[in-house]
Image (cartoon, rainbow, N blue to C red):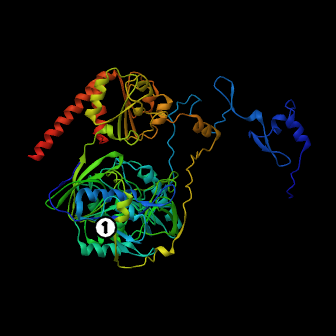
Amino acid sequence: MSDVIRRDPRAEWIARNRLHPLHGTIAVGDDAEVRGPSGLLRKNPHKVGFIGPNGIKRIDRLKGNGAASGMGRRSSGPQEVQLPLHSVESPDFYIVVVPDLVGGRLTSQDKDILGQAHKIANGIKGEGAVVAVCFGESKEENYDTAGVDRLIHLEGEEYEGFSPEQRLAALVQVEASLQPKHWLFPDSVNGGTDLGSRLAARLGERPAVQAWQVTHETTVSRGASQSLDITRETPRILMLLEECADAIDETRHEAKALELDSVPRAIVQLQDQGQVAVDPNAIPLAEAEFILSAGNGIHNWDQFHDTAAALGATEGASRVAVDDGFMPRFRQVGATGTWVTARVYLAVGISGAIQHMQGIGQCDKVVAINTDAGCDMVKRAALSAIGDSEEILGELLKLAQEHRANKGEEGEQNAA
Amino acid sequence: MQPNIKQSLDIVSLVSIGQHPQSGRVRRAEQDGRAVELGMNLGGDNLTVLHAGDPQEQALRTYAGMGLSSMQVLNLDLQDDAVPALADYLQQLRPDIVLTGVRAESGESSGMVPYLLAEKLNWPVVARIADIVSVEDGVAEVMLALPRGQRRALKVALPFVASVDNAAPEARQSAYGPGIRAQIEPLAGVKEEDTVRSNWSEAKAKPRPKRLKVVKAKTAAERFKAATAKPQGEAGKVLKGVPAKEQAQEIFNLLLEEKVI
């Protein structure tokens, strides 16, 4: 047999002629695409698509990505895509990541560092597992998609609040039991740098700080107030800057809990006296953690200021409130004003112009109080209350004052 | 505000040579200046300002110009490690508080010096302090600078090492004349060459590449959606037709859960 494609002119002629009595037997199959005689791909436009319920021809160009509708079937919402599972049965080595867990959740820097850990592990021969050591209360649910193979979660009152000494004791225990190849910390003000430096000093390792380009062989880190790039062999302890690597997004991981032998109680020389109340309005708006923001829907401004004071929130405002003269210009949130990074943003009477939504793009939890259930702010919010803002703020003010009073009593009892 | 000091304190402020962020000229380092300022407010005349490096360095005069009559300098070469010399000196001096900046503005700027000194001297180390409020019966109350403008109070027994954050009171102005007249006392320090560092290569910092927003779409429809659709989180809980009291309670619970109150 030769590879030459033989043409049958008669069969082709019958196939072309739909009125020919033999057309039905010769006609090309149901495929819309066939190899032509010269090997080119031929598409038959008459064969594309299907006849819809109304007898009208429909062509689906979404390639299965549209909402699963049509043919009388009900759509069951977008299908959750199950990512492939990356499992490590018996790891040859460990890479330990100690995330910051600000507010109990992985920050974007933490996720980048987990990605970095996998990048390093892939470079080294053998199968490695990425271990995350988490302290205190954790609200994170997506350890698996963030790239955690093994999870050591240490909870208890000794890890709550400010406890670098106890955490260091736990890390020394991890070092003894796992002997990790690398320790990765976020180089951040949220405690990552502090803990990493403490561990490096205890283990006598020389860490690379402000590292931003790391492979399993070499590390590039910043020095001399960001004006110098230092290239060196990758050390055991690394403190990494933001966006050092890409976060994991194509695989799922086991996040298998790993038990640690009992951690000895550290001698606590730094006695935590708790957080000190600071004037929330003295904190720059861009850095504030909790913002109570007012818009056009506020009519009782005294009540708004009282509520902000009782909740201990920094005050913000939408452009309308500022233009009308109720709030100073430096309190404006949005594209023209300040781009805020608050963890919790409570928007009262703000419907959510696109400029305002840009300004709160980095906020974690948005809470909306509005009269209009269809506005953009309600769509963005994790929790929204539909109703009169004055009434709801009044109730909120009462709750906050009660909470304060209770706290004060407790404090007195503790002192007594 | 004047700190509440009930005893005489021996304080050592460690200073390094700073670097201007734009011109790159040597200067008084921002955080070390604050450490000296804090030390002057606390210790008054008992403050020792200590530098490890070249005693001829002109930038040291800008620290002296803050009103110091003298400064101590451990004479080291450029390639020497500062930590053994400093640890040795502090072991003999036994001060109550050692203050440093968080990170040096030149060299490796790893910020490890306070930790390494604390480990060698077996003292506690407090990172990023904003203020020392009081010292009473050998216990200091320290104000820690947290991110987002928050503060945490901490009690720590003397002696300890602390690094001073940018939130601490700003360093006072430096006067040229007194700075020139101040005495700089060179001391012989333990010389130990930093051999690890000699294997590194250093280059001027390249700007870091900006992260691009990569759309991992497989079809044109997905790409189109990613380019045009409004970024929206999944719709949250909506409380409609519920009494205001319950709505407020729900919001308050969320605030408590997020620990912002």
Q: Nearer the viewer, residue A135 or A261?
A: A135
Which residue matches tag 1? B70
Q: Please say if B74 is above or below A121.
A: below
Give the quarter of the image for residue A309: top left
Residue drawn 48% across and 28% down?
A353
Q: Which type of secondary structure does the marked residue at label 1 adopt?
A: strand
Q: Nearer the viewer, residue A246 or A409?
A: A409
Visible in this render: residue A177?
no
Q: Position of residue A33 (x, y in %)?
A: 76, 42
Dot 1, how many residues are within 10 Å of its Cα: few (below 14), some (14-19), or many (20+)?
A: some
Q: Chain of mark 1?
A: B
Visible in this render: residue A363?
yes
Q: Position of residue B112 (x, y in %)?
A: 37, 66
Count of numbered tags: 1
Residue drawn 23% across and 31% down?
A399
In-image side of B179 versus A40 (left or right): left
Quadrant of the frame with the C terminus of chain B = top left
- Residue lying at the far right in this picture: please name it: A9
Q: Please say if A340 is above or below A143.
A: above
Q: Nearer the viewer, residue B78 or A156?
A: B78
Residue drawn 40% across and 75% down?
B76
Residue drawn 26% across and 74% down?
B91
- Residue lying at the far left in this picture: please name it: A416
Q: Position of residue B218 (x, y in %)?
A: 62, 44
Give the quarter of the image for residue B77: bottom left
* Amino acid found under the numbered disc labelled 1: Ser
Q: Position of residue B94 (x, y in %)?
A: 23, 71
